[in-house]
Amino acid sequence: MRLKFILLVTITVFSFSCSDDKEDVGDETEQSKIYGTWEATELKINDQTASDDAKFGSSILSYLTNNDCTIVSFTFNADMTLVANNATNYLDIGVNSSDSGLEIPCPTEMDTETSIYTYDGVTLTYVDAENQNVSITPIISGNIMTITAADLGYSNLDAEGELVFEKR
């Protein structure tokens, strides 16, 4: 009888301690969803209400993405460092006589900023180039992350709509 009681207590103790461990692992998994390199692949806009600039920006991003050109990317490291690459300042849009009438080569230069960040599974906070804390709420679903475009504050991408990133 005493052996059964000790066995029951032992199983009960292990059951409670295991449930706490599972909660911690869940938090780590939620936070680690952001780790890796994310490349901007699409600017989702409402064609009915979007400005001409937003429509043009969406078309350019789509064209360059389809030609394996990265314009904006973020790398979130497990040590809480962030590397942001932005080539929007180096876009050189020209006119040609082909079907589209536009010539948009992939920029060969980009601005790179290194910062620190925190991510709690909901809110992403990072320090921008002006040493200001910026908080945004990305939506991460598998290998797709969506961010409100205006929240990023890039002068050439400060458009309405959502910027979609794909994890590479």
Image (cartoon, helix red, strand yellow):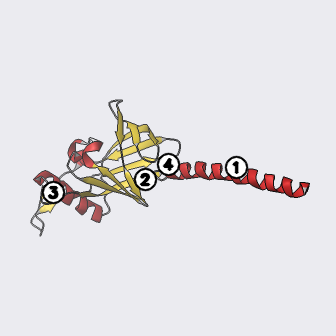
Numbered label attached to residue 4: none
Numbered label attached to residue 31: 4
**Other residues around mark 3 within 10 Å, as few (<14) / some (14–19) / many (≥20):** some
Earlier sequence position, callout 2 versus callout 4: 4
Earlier sequence position, callout 3 versus callout 2: 2
> To which quarter of the image does residue 11 belong?
bottom right
Identify residue for label 2.
Answer: 37
Alpha-carbon distance for marks 2 and 1?
35 Å
Identify residue for label 1.
Answer: 17
Mark 2 touches mark 4? (CB < 8 Å): no
Earlier sequence position, callout 2 versus callout 1: 1
Earlier sequence position, callout 3 versus callout 4: 4
Q: Amino acid at mark 2?
A: Thr
Q: Secondary structure at mark 3?
A: helix
Q: Quadrant of the N terminus?
A: bottom right
Where residue 53 sits in the image (x, y, percent)?
Answer: 13, 51
Q: Secondary structure at mark 4?
A: helix
Would you place residue 141 above or below residue 126 in this image? below
Where residue 168 sits in the image (x, y, percent)?
Answer: 42, 59
> To which quarter of the image does residue 133 belong?
top left
Alpha-carbon distance for marks 3 and 4?
33 Å
Numbered label attached to residue 55: 3
